[in-house]
Amino acid sequence: MEESEIVQNQESSLSLNDLMPPVFRVQLVREAGVKRAEISDAHDAVAVLRRYLEHEDREHFVTLMLDVKNQVIGIHTVSIGNLNSAIVSPREVFKAAILANAASIILGHNHPSGDTTPSPEDIQVTEILSQAGKLLQIDVLDHVIIGEDGAFCSLRRDGRMPRG
């Protein structure tokens, strides 16, 4: 028998029970003693987002991940773009939220120009992500745009969030 025939015979004798796929374990690890902010309105979300985004010179799209009591579990940078756009994918937005066991999220991004007026793309991505959140049972509570000198836009406050 040739060597290639021996290898082929060994492979064909393996059953599905013999094949073990990689096993993954996901566990949320929290740092002890870290005080978590509670978000009760757009101003609370802005305070957290501004601190995280205030010195960025390019557009950053982030999510605030919240527990059932609207306390911040964490913040996740989804995408870093250029001066006036960032690529946003529902898969990337919700990956961290799922891993963190988030009950809800708040979308946020900065406009380096300082103008907080939502673009048509901002409205469209909010609608898409809200629909994805419904499927995943993770509420999208708001989409906040951070500008200059304390300026911000809350799509929820301005009545521009998609209706459930």
Image: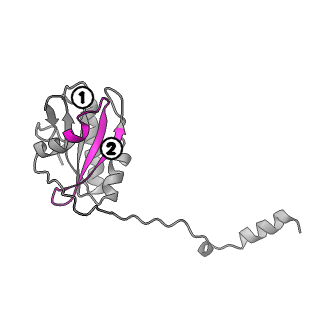
Q: Amino acid at mark 1?
A: Ser
Provide the secondary structure element on which disc 1 rests.
loop
Q: Quadrant of the N terminus?
A: bottom right
**Residue 67 horizontal/vertical position (percent):** 21, 59
* Residue at mark 1: 119
**Residue 141 horizontal/vertical position (percent):** 18, 48
From the viewer's side, name the closer residue of 127 and 22.
22
Q: Is residue 18 left or right of residue 142?
A: right
The magenta span reads 50-79
Q: 113 above or below 45?
A: above
Task: Determine the image quadrant of residue 55.
Answer: top left
**Residue 104 horizontal/vertical position (percent):** 22, 54
Residue 56 lies in the magenta stretch: yes
Tell me what residue is drawn at x 72 percent, y 73 percent.
13
Tell me what residue is drawn at x 33 percent, y 63 percent.
28
Provide the secondary structure element on which disc 2 rests.
strand
In front: mark 2 or mark 1?
A: 2
